[in-house]
């Protein structure tokens, strides 16, 4: 009898355990609370970053007054705005507020709620470009509106109205805060004063003079006084040029004579190199725009997500912006003459360089400085070697004056582009080796200072 009782109790216990396990395996009911799955910025494609960076390059090309220094500044603020609009969605990402020069704080995203980071970036870039390119044509302003609305319509199909509204509002607040900060840097609306009439041209032995373009006042003579994005870049020691001399045995004379000699025997390949990197502001998106496009190419080549793309464009934008400030500070500290001037007064009065001399002093080379800075930040992000194709100018028609086509160029590292960009100015007959070599050195320093910012929390 007892054995039967114990057996029945044991059977009931086993059945109870089986029922418990069975219910535990059942799916949760619809009315049970579920933790929301919030997408990070790394889970979005880079499309929004690529489309807006392309728009900015288009606006630089098609808006009056966007000289290389002015363009570099716009790219700096465009990159920072994009990054700050998505950095709350980057796991471990660190805002640049409190790190960049005089940027004390920025609006913060709410915690624990969902954002659509592409929608945030879209709103931020549209708002910032309206501010940076306030002088552009109505047709171009319509292009900004059109891109913003087209992307927003897509994003509304991907998230609820509340999420999109929150994301758009955050993006706009970021852009408005960054734009307000930009207005105090010394370069606000610089497109209105590329050649300020109040500037007194320096007259001295070896100083810059009007070249074949006839421009009497040099470009942006006060640009070197602007606020840099990174404080360390403002505090870099100014590199000293060779002492001015006309003695045929001097290093100074040898530097300029080398330009003249090489310019008289350029190969077709060397002409193609010179023209590819010329980035004439009247026909292209300028030299810093070329660098920004290299950042876009790196993003596409590596198939980077929105998180990586935003950091890539922010670093590159800051690098080229600071490079032009540092370089222009040096240019107008020494007012160094161009090869055109030196060669015509000491060697050959009728000499014309392969490429027209830009209307500002020679030392340092802006191409070399900003290319070196760009290569340094891109290498830190994507490594070396990194093979890619630079197709920035393949859509341009043949340069009939110089008998040169625009062919895509393949590189195995970012530093190769920097060295070739610098060398192209020597081939063009508008920079000496000291201009280029020193520019690359200074550019590398600028890029390293950008890389040294805290891009990740705790790093």
Image (cartoon, rainbow, N blue to C red):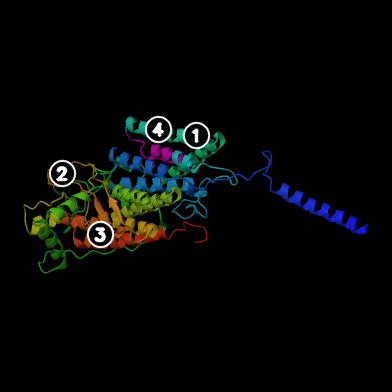
Mark 2 to mark 4 CA distance (whole Å): 34 Å
Sequence-first tag of 1 and 3: 1
The residue lying at 42 percent from left, 33 percent from top is 150
Q: Is residue 118 visible?
A: yes
Residue 309 lies in the magenta stretch: no
Residue 2 picture location, percent across and down:
92, 58
Q: Is residue 439 left or right of 175 when viewed as pictured? A: left
Nearer the observer, 196 or 289: 289
Residue 170, labelled with which disc? none
Q: Residues within 10 Å of mark 4 (few under 14, many from 20)?
A: some
Q: Which residues are magenta?
A: 123-136
- Mark toward the viewer: 1 or 2: 1
Residue 145, labelled with which disc? 4
Q: Which residue is mark 1?
A: 157
Mark 3 to mark 2 CA distance (whole Å): 23 Å
Sequence-first tag of 1 and 2: 1
Residue 246 picture location, percent across and down:
12, 64
Q: Which residue is mark 2?
A: 399
Residue 125 lies in the magenta stretch: yes
Q: Residues within 10 Å of mark 1 (few under 14, many from 20)?
A: few
Say which quarter of the image contains residue 109: top right
Q: Residues within 10 Å of mark 2 (few under 14, many from 20)?
A: few
């Amino acid at each position: 009898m007892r054995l039967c009782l114990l057996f029945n109790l044991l059977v009931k216990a086993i059945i109870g355990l089986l029922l418990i396990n069975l219910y535990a395996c059942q799916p949760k009911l619809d009315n049970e609370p579920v933790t929301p799955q919030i997408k990070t910025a790394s889970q979005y494609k880079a499309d929004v970053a690529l489309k807006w960076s392309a728009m900015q390059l288009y606006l630089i090309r098609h808006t009056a007054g966007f000289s290389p220094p002015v363009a570099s500044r716009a790219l700096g603020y465009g990159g920072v705005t994009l990054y700050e609009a998505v950095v709350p969605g980057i796991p471990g990402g660190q805002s640049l507020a409190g790190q960049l020069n005089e940027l004390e704080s920025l609006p913060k995203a709410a915690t624990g709620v969902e954002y659509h980071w592409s929608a945030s970036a879209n709103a931020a870039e549209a708002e910032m470009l309206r501010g940076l390119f306030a002088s552009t044509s109505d047709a171009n302003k319509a292009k900004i509106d059109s891109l913003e609305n087209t992307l927003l319509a897509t994003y509304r199909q991907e998230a609820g109205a509340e999420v999109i509204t929150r994301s758009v509002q955050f993006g706009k607040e970021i852009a408005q805060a960054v734009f307000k900060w930009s207005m105090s840097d010394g370069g606000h609306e610089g497109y209105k004063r590329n050649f300020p009439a109040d500037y007194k041209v320096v007259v001295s032995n070896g100083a810059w003079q009007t070249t074949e373009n006839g421009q009497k006042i040099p470009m942006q003579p006060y640009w070197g006084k602007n606020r840099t994005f990174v404080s360390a870049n403002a505090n870099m020691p100014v590199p000293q040029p060779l002492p001015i001399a006309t003695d045929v045995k001097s290093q100074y004379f040898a530097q300029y004579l080398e330009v003249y000699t090489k310019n008289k025997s350029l190969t077709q390949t060397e002409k193609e190199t010179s023209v590819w990197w010329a980035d004439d502001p009247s026909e292209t998106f300028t030299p810093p725009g070329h660098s920004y496009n290299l950042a876009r190419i790196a993003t596409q080549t590596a198939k980077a997500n929105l998180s990586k793309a935003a950091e890539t464009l922010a670093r590159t934008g800051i690098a080229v912006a600071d490079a032009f400030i540092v370089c222009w500070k040096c240019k107008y500290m020494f007012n160094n003459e161009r090869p055109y001037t030196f060669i015509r007064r000491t060697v050959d009065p009728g000499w014309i360089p392969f490429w027209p001399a830009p209307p500002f002093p020679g030392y340092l080379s802006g191409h070399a400085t900003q290319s070196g800075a760009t290569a340094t930040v891109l290498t830190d992000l994507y490594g070396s070697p990194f093979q890619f194709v630079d197709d920035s100018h393949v859509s341009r028609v043949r340069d009939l004056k110089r008998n040169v086509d625009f062919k895509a160029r393949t590189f195995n590292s970012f530093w190769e582009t920097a060295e070739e960009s610098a060398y192209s100015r020597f081939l063009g007959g508008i920079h000496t080796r000291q201009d280029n070599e020193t520019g690359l050195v200074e550019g590398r320093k600028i890029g390293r200072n950008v890389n040294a910012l805290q891009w990740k929390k705790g790093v």
